[in-house]
Image (cartoon, helix red, strand yellow):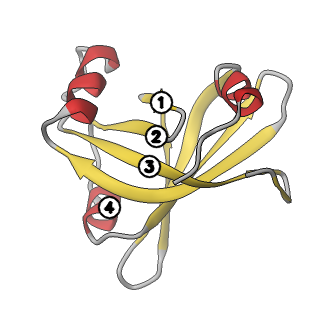
Amino acid sequence: MKKLQENIIKEWNNKKGPVVFTTVGKNGVPNAIYASCVSLFDRRTILIADNYFDKTKRNILSGGMASVLFITEEDKSYQIKGTLSYHKSGPFFDDMKEWNPPEHPGRGAVSIEVDEVYSGSEKIL
């Protein structure tokens, strides 16, 4: 697990629109969704609220890695890759319940522990 650098956190805080959240199933088939209920928990962890996951949740529970792709207001793209965990209680879940909109169920919190960061094809972490 690696720490996001200050410049990447600044770009995260300048993201526009939803992120693209990609998981991979046991069979190796990727699944990508738009996720708008996301937050930076700390310099090592991104949280995504499970409001309506189906295939995505199955992929998460099968273990493995994921990626989060976002674009900034200046149209610069970043991809963060990391290891997945699913939480129905505990600090990640509690944090998600604080910022997830009340009209969404917030069934669980997905944590992505940062392993790599890319900007375009350039690996920056």
Q: Are marks 1 and 2 in contact (CB under 8 Å)?
A: yes
> What's the amino acid at mark 3?
Ile
Residue 28 in the image: above or below residue 57? below
Query: Who comes first in sequence, dot 4 or dot 1?
Result: 1
Q: Residues within 10 Å of mark 4 (few under 14, many from 20)?
A: many
**CA–CA distance in space, label 4 to label 1:** 20 Å
Tell me residue 10's x, y (percent): 71, 22
Query: Who comes first in sequence, dot 4 or dot 2?
Result: 2
Q: Is residue 8 left or right of residue 120?
A: left
Q: Residues within 10 Å of mark 3 (few under 14, many from 20)?
A: many
Judged from the image, the secondary structure of the residue bearing numbered disc 4 is: helix
Front: mark 1 or 3: 1
**CA–CA distance in space, label 3 to label 2:** 5 Å
Q: Are marks 3 and 2 in contact (CB under 8 Å)?
A: yes
**CA–CA distance in space, label 4 to label 2:** 15 Å
Residue under numbered circle 1: 42
Residue under numbered circle 3: 112
Residue 6 in the image: above or below residue 57? above
Q: Is residue 103 left or right of residue 79?
A: left
Tell me residue 91's x, y (percent): 23, 31
Residue under numbered circle 4: 60
Q: Are marks 1 and 3 in contact (CB under 8 Å)?
A: no
Judged from the image, the secondary structure of the residue bearing numbered disc 2 is: strand
> What's the amino acid at mark 4?
Ile
**CA–CA distance in space, label 1 to label 3:** 11 Å
> What's the amino acid at mark 2?
Thr
Judged from the image, the secondary structure of the residue bearing numbered disc 3 is: strand
Judged from the image, the secondary structure of the residue bearing numbered disc 1 is: strand
The residue under the point 31% across, 54% down is 85
**CA–CA distance in space, label 1 to label 2:** 5 Å
